[in-house]
């Protein structure tokens, strides 16, 4: 209930403005966001590689309604990929990028889908040139079909493009079946948006059970599952399923968010699994931060205090 309420009030412009200006917010942001600039993001990726953690880097920003902003985001991604390659961090997909289609134009009325696809294509071309990959993030359920359609179109030229599926959606087990084919990189997460009962499980246990069903399909299939969760039980189940299906260590990976369960990330990497950290950077951190706070009631204290200290 708290999660839903937080996601709801976060949509208010006055709440956004209060939180963004509050000094307390900065401390909370620093926990989850790896700086504002490309060099800061590259520095964090380099640091994580010293403990055998790969990265997928996200330039923060979503629901862009301005064409120039969408083009700017594309340019930042291309500059980021070049900077990663210069530091020899991108080869073999060790550092890749995650892209939200709404950050590169999907939400722009009229030709938004086509624009987002074109921008994503340019980012994929840069990634291919530098020997790394791109994963297309999944946003709220109103965009699921269009996003999967864009992934299909991108895969025609870049078969390694990753997709994200959310276990809270009723449809996801069927999507897993469709997408568990050879070469298909699928990140499975629980889902971070406020979704209606008509499309999504509302109860945490149902979301977890769905996650396990989806994971079974992905691990039994021919694709490349990316197990994105901090939930210790699901990490164990992912590991057991990989073993059960005789998967080699390079045929799946675990993923967690920057700033969440850091020691566990290192432990998973030390156990010989591939571990990738989702590393967000940029100035437009508000939407991302609210979703992280909503996932953990203890964090809400910081959120409320940041409003009170204004
Ligand atoms: P759950 O929320 O049940 O958390 C399990 C445990 O992890 C908690 O008890 C706590 O210990 C710890 N934990 C979780 N979140 C925390 C936090 N914010 N701060 C501190 N501790 C925390 N979603 C989406 O809709 N579209 C997407 O494209 C992506 N992409 C994505 C990539 C990667 C790599 C990850 C790890 C996650 C996403 N997500 C996402 C977010 C995902 O949907 C989900 O909201 C979060 O991962 C939280 O769910 P958990 O599976 O971790 O379980």
Image (cartoon, rainbow, N blue to C red):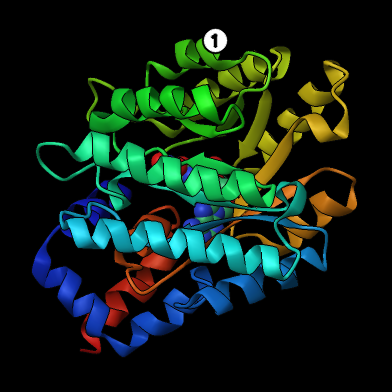
- 258 vs 19: above or below: above
Image coords of residue 60 (percent x, y): 39, 62
Ligand 1 contact, mark 1 (Cβ < 8 Å):
no
Above/below status of 19 relative to 290: below
Q: Is residue 122 above or below residue 46?
A: above
Query: Which image quadrant is residue 294 in?
Result: bottom left
Q: Nearer the viewer, residue 209 or 68?
A: 68
Say which residue appears at 82% left-offset and 55% top-offset.
267
- Identify the image quadrant of the N terminus: top left
Res 192 seen here = no
Residue found 55% across the figure and 52% down from its top: 97
| Camera-nearest residue between 184 and 22 | 184
Horizontal and vertical percent for residue 165?
A: 47, 29
Residue 279, position as x, y percentages in the image: 56, 61
Q: Quadrant of residue 11?
A: bottom left
Left or right: 118 as drawn, with respect to 276: left
In which quadrant of the rendered image does the C terminus lie? bottom left
The correct choice, above or below, for 195 with respect to 215 in the image is below
Residue 49 in sight from this viewpoint: yes
How many discs mark residues in the rendered view?
1
Residue 71 at x, y = what percent?
A: 29, 58
Q: In what element is the residue under mark 1?
A: helix
Please state if 93 lies on the left or on the right of 113 as rendered.
Answer: right
Q: Quadrant of residue 114?
A: top left
Q: Is residue 110 left or right of residue 176?
A: left
Pointer 1 residue = 177
The one of 194 and 47 positioned closer to us in this rendering:
47
Residue at (35%, 68%) from the top-left corner? Answer: 285
Few, some or many residues within 10 Å of mark 1 (<14, 14–19, 20+): some
């Amino acid at each position: 209930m708290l999660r839903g309420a937080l996601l709801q009030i976060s949509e208010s412009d006055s709440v956004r403005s209060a939180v963004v200006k509050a000094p307390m917010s900065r401390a909370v942001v620093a926990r989850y966001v790896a700086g504002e600039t490309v060099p800061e993001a590259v520095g964090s990726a380099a640091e994580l590689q010293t403990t055998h953690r790969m990265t997928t880097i996200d330039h923060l920003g979503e629901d862009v309604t301005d064409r120039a902003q969408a083009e700017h985001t594309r340019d930042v991604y291309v500059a980021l990929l070049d900077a990663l390659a210069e530091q020899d961090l991108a080869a073999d997909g060790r550092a890749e990028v995650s892209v939200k289609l709404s950050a590169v134009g999907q939400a722009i009325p009229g030709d938004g889908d086509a624009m987002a696809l074109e921008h994503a294509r340019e980012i994929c071309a840069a990634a291919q040139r530098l020997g790394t990959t791109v994963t297309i993030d999944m946003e709220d359920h109103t965009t699921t079909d269009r996003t999967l359609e864009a992934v299909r179109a991108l895969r025609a030229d870049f078969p390694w493009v990753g997709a994200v599926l959310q276990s809270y959606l009723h449809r996801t087990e069927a999507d897993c079946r469709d997408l568990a084919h050879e070469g298909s990189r699928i990140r499975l997460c629980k889902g971070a948006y406020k979704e209606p009962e008509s499309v999504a499980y509302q109860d945490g246990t149902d979301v977890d059970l769905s996650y396990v069903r989806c994971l079974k399909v992905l691990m039994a299939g021919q694709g490349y599952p990316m197990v994105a969760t901090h939930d210790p039980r699901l990490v164990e189940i992912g590991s057991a399923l990989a073993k059960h299906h005789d998967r080699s260590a390079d045929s799946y990976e675990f993923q967690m968010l920057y700033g969440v369960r850091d020691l566990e990330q290192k432990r998973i990497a030390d156990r010989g699994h591939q571990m990738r950290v989702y590393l967000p950077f940029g100035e437009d951190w508000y939407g991302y931060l609210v979703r992280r706070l909503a996932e953990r009631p203890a964090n809400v204290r910081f959120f409320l205090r940041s409003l009170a200290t204004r």
